[in-house]
Amino acid sequence: MTTATTISSTRRRRAFVGAVSGHLIEWFDYGVYGFLALTMGQLFFASESPAVSLLSSFAVFALSFFIRPLGGIFFGPMADRIGRKQTLLVVMLLMSGSTCLIGLLPTYASIGIAAPLLLILLRCIQGFSAGGEIGTVTSFVAEYAGPRRRAFSTSWLMVTAVLGLMLGSLVANGLTSLLGQDGMAAWGWRLPFLLAGPLGLVAAYIRLKLEDSPEFLALHAAGGHEKAPLREAMRWKRALTIVFFVIVLHSSIFYLVLTFASTFMTNTLGFGNSTRFWYVLLACGLAAAVMPLGGAFTDRYGRKPFLIGAGLMATGSMFWFFQAAPGATPESFLPPLLATAVSFGLYVSSTYATMTELIPTRIRSTGISIAYNVPVAVFGGCAPFVASWLITTTGDITSPWYFFVATGLVSLAALLVLHPNDFRRAAAASVPTSSTGEAPPAADSPSVRPTAEATA
C-alpha cells in the first residue's frame, strides 16, 4: 500500500511543484481584477460618480465569490469520486480560459450594457473555477505531505496565493506606472488578463503529468472512496461549522491586505501610485515570508494555541489599520500596514492544515469546498465592497474596522471550542478499509502515531 511515507522524493516534489505552480497562476488570474478595480469600474460601469463606478466594480468582484460555493459543490465531490488530479486540471483550464476572455471584452463605450453583463458572466466562471480549486489542491498537497509536515506544506499554497496576487499587482501597477491612467484605460488593462492564456496552458501541462495523492489512491484501492460525498459531508456538521468560522478571519484579512488596502491607500488616503505599489509589495512579501515559519511551528507544537495568538494579533492590527487612517502619511501608515500583514501571514499559515485534519479523506475535498467557500464569499469577497460602502455611507474612513474586527472575534470564538477529539475523529475515519474489512497499515496516519494536532 502506497502511503505518504513510502512514495519517492521525486514524486513528492513533482506533485508539490505541479500543485503550487497551478495555484500561483489561479490566483494571478483571479486577483488581477482587484488591482484593476478602478480602471474596470470606469470602463464597464458608466457613472458620473467615481465612487459609484468603483462600488459597481467591487460588487462584481464580490459576486464572483458567491459563485464559489457552487463551484465547490460541483468540483469537490468530483475530486472525492474520481480523484484530485483530474479535477485540478479541469479547474485550471476553466480559470485561465475565462480570464483570458476578459482581456478580449469590448467596453461599455463600445457595446453598452452588454459589456458589464459579459464581464459578470466571465467573473462568475472564474468564481466557479476557484470554488473547485481550493478544496482539491489543499487535499492533494496535505495528503502528499503527511501529518508531520502538513501545515508547512499547505502553507506554501497560501504563499503561492500571495505570490500570484503579487504577480498581479506587479503587472497591473507596473503597467499603470509605465503607461499612465490614460494608457491603461485605452488598452493596457487588457494585457494582464491576456497573459492568463499562455500561463494557464503551461500550468495545465504540468498538472497533466501528476499522479494522484497517495491517500486517495489507497482509499480507492481499498474500495473506500465515497460514492455520495456531498451527502456524507453533511454528517460532519460540527467539523464543517468549525472550519467555516475559523476561515471567517482568514477571508477578511486576506482581502484587506491583498486587495482593499491597495485601493484604500490611493482613493482614500491619497497616496501616490508608486507608494501604493511598493507598500503592497512589501506587505505581501512580509506576509508570505512568515507563512512557512508559522506552519512549521504548528506542525511541531500544535495548531490551536498558535492560531488563537495569531487571531488576537490579526484582530488588533486590523483595528489599528483603520484607526491610523485619518491624517495618515505614507510614513505613519506603514507600521499598521506591516503589522496587519505579519499577523495575516501567521494566522493563515495553519488554517489549511487545520481544515484537512478536521475532515476525513473520503470527503475531504467536498467538506473543504463547502466549509471554506461560503465564508470566503460572505466575509472575503464582500470585504472590499463592505469597506467601500461603509466609508461612502458614513463619511468616516475608520468605519470598516467594525466589520473586520467582528470577523476576528467570530474566528476566535470558533478556535476556543475546538477540541482534540475533533481531530481524532477525522483521523480515525480517514484510515482506509479493505474489502476484507481490515485497515491497511499507514505509518504516517494521525491515528497511528501522535501528531501536533492531537495536543491542540
Image (cartoon, grey):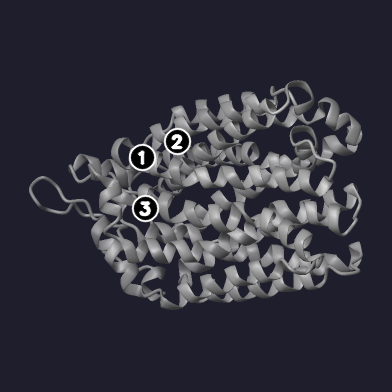
Looking at the image, is mark 1 or mark 2 earlier in the sequence? Answer: 1
- Quadrant, the N terminus: top left
Number of labels in the image equals 3
Answer with the quarter of the image where residue 220 lies.
top left
Looking at the image, is mark 2 or mark 3 earlier in the sequence? Answer: 2
Q: Which residue is mark 2?
A: 88
Report the mark closest to the observer, 3 or 1: 3
Q: Amino acid at mark 2?
A: Leu
Q: Which residue is mark 1?
A: 79
- Quadrant, the C terminus: bottom left
Q: Amino acid at mark 3?
A: Gly
The x, y position of residue 274, in whole percent, is 89, 48
User: Measured along the vertical axis of the image, is residue 352 above or below residue 40?
Assistant: below
**How many neighbours does mark 1 have within 10 angstroms: few (below 14), some (14-19), or many (20 or more)?**
many
**How many neighbours does mark 2 have within 10 angstroms: few (below 14), some (14-19), or many (20 or more)?**
many
Lateral position of residue 391 relative to residue 409, left or right:
right
Pick the residue in front: 380 or 317: 380
The x, y position of residue 182, in whole percent, is 90, 32
Q: Which residue is mark 3?
A: 367
Report the mark closest to the observer, 2 or 3: 3
Lateral position of residue 261 relative to residue 186, left or right:
left
Lateral position of residue 267 relative to residue 223, left or right:
right
The x, y position of residue 317, in whole percent, is 70, 72
Q: Is residue 288 at all visible to an observer of this figure?
A: no
Q: Judging from the image, what secondary structure is the residue with disc 1 in? A: helix
Looking at the image, is mark 3 or mark 1 earlier in the sequence? Answer: 1
Q: Is residue 379 at all visible to an observer of this figure?
A: yes
Residues at discs 1 and 2 in contact (Cβ within 8 Å): yes
Q: Amino acid at mark 1?
A: Ala
x 68%, y 45%: residue:
165
Instruction: Measure the C-alpha gap from mark 3 to mark 1.
Output: 11 Å
Q: Judging from the image, what secondary structure is the residue with disc 2 in? A: helix
